[in-house]
Amino acid sequence: MHGRLKVRTTAEQQEIKAKERAKKMVIYKTAMNLIFSKRKSGELDDEILKITGQVLTENPDISTLWNIRKETILKIKDAMPDLIDSYISKELALTEQCIRVNPKSYNSWFHRSWVLDQGSSVDFHNEFLLCDKCLELDERNFHCWDYRRIIVQKSKTSLENELQFSTDKIQKNFSNYSSWHYRSELLPRIYPSSSDESLLDDQKLAEECNLVQNAIFTDPNDQSAWFYQRWLLFNGDEKFRTSSSHSSLLLTLNNELESCQQLHDLEPDNKWVKLQVCELLRRINGLGNETEILQLVQQLIKVDPLRKGYYTYFGNSTILMNLKKKIKKEFTSLILNTLIVSGSKIVEENQEKRTGQS
């Protein structure tokens, strides 16, 4: 059987792995004992940074070691402030290496954020490049998105640039929920509304509605754009929406309803479009659209039976809300009629008194 590679049995493979783990465990325990010994004796120096770095590159999620590195960096910063920038560069290199090992390591990202505050100068261009690389690998890495917010604030990067970044991400992939969410944080700060009926000014709201419609019509089954549209349309003060038939937001809601109904004709079994039509009908005129809403609720239960409880609650809450409106309307009408009748009686009594006196 010369020249053939021997195929190891499962038992042999397990034995080899067990030996490798045991060897690594010996190295790990030796390193940890040395680290704690040096820390106890106050030897926070280059050697402890070297040893902790070796362990962390294998396992970035040991919080204690990151804290020991913080203590060491602060000690060096106090003793040798002129050299701190070189140590900061090494910390940034280490955290980047650890992030490559585990892109979702809490400790690595937290330590990197802390390091930014310790040096006298930071290459923010490099920090943005790191974020770009990580988001290329996983566009929903919330650790990276949070870190990007931090460096945007520290570097005083314009929010308009970040909005364009989110636009590019969305146009590349409409399913990028993290980018939609980031957009929802930026827009009210850049384009605030002058009224309480919506979060954005009218022009920007119309532009965002067009953007989200493109996403919805491209992939009606993707929930990211639907959730963003709900935030876009339903976060204002509802009393402004119903107080005037000429409300700009009310006109927008009617336009969105028309678009959703067109999509519903194309995708009659799509639960997302049915639910959005229900919500739009209820927001525009829940009382007048109650019958249509309840019909759509029954259709939703058929196409998505797993969420029957939620749809039933939606329908019942619509009925209850409309009942409250009816009672309020009837009560207001009753009060007005009572006041009118009482006023008429008072006028008649006054007239009778005047007639009797004359």
Image (cartoon, rainbow, N blue to C red):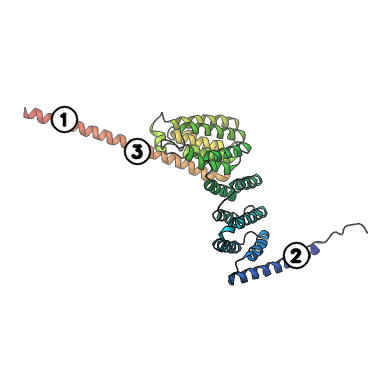
- Crowding at mark 2 (Cα within 10 Å: few <14, some 14-19, many 20+): few
Dot 3: what SS? helix
For the question of whether residue 221 can be seen, the reply is no
Decide which of tag 1 and tag 3 comes sooner along the chain.
3
For this orientation, the residue located farthest to the right is 2
Is residue 78 toward the left or the right of residue 12 in the image?
A: left
Determine the CA span between mark 1 and mark 2. Answer: 105 Å
Q: Report the residue marked by disc 1.
A: 348
Residue at image x 55%, y 39%?
161
Dot 2: what SS? helix
Q: Where residue 4 appears, x then y in whole percent?
A: 90, 57
Give whichever of 308, 191 is nearer the camera: 191
Decide which of tag 1 and tag 2 comes sooner along the chain.
2
In the picture, residue 268 is in which quadrant?
top right
User: Does 168 sit above or below residue 356?
Assistant: below
In the picture, residue 290 is in which quadrant?
top left
Q: Report the residue marked by disc 2.
A: 20
Mark 1 vs mark 2: in front: 2
Amino acid at the residue labelled 2? Glu
Is residue 323 toward the left or the right of residue 125 in the image?
A: left
Determine the CA span between mark 3 and mark 2. Answer: 75 Å
Verify CB contact (< 8 Å) between mark 1 and mark 2.
no
Verify CB contact (< 8 Å) between mark 3 and mark 2.
no
Quadrant into which the N terminus falls: bottom right
Amino acid at the residue labelled 3? Lys
Where residue 328 is drawn, which disc sits there?
A: 3
Determine the CA span between mark 1 and mark 3. Answer: 30 Å
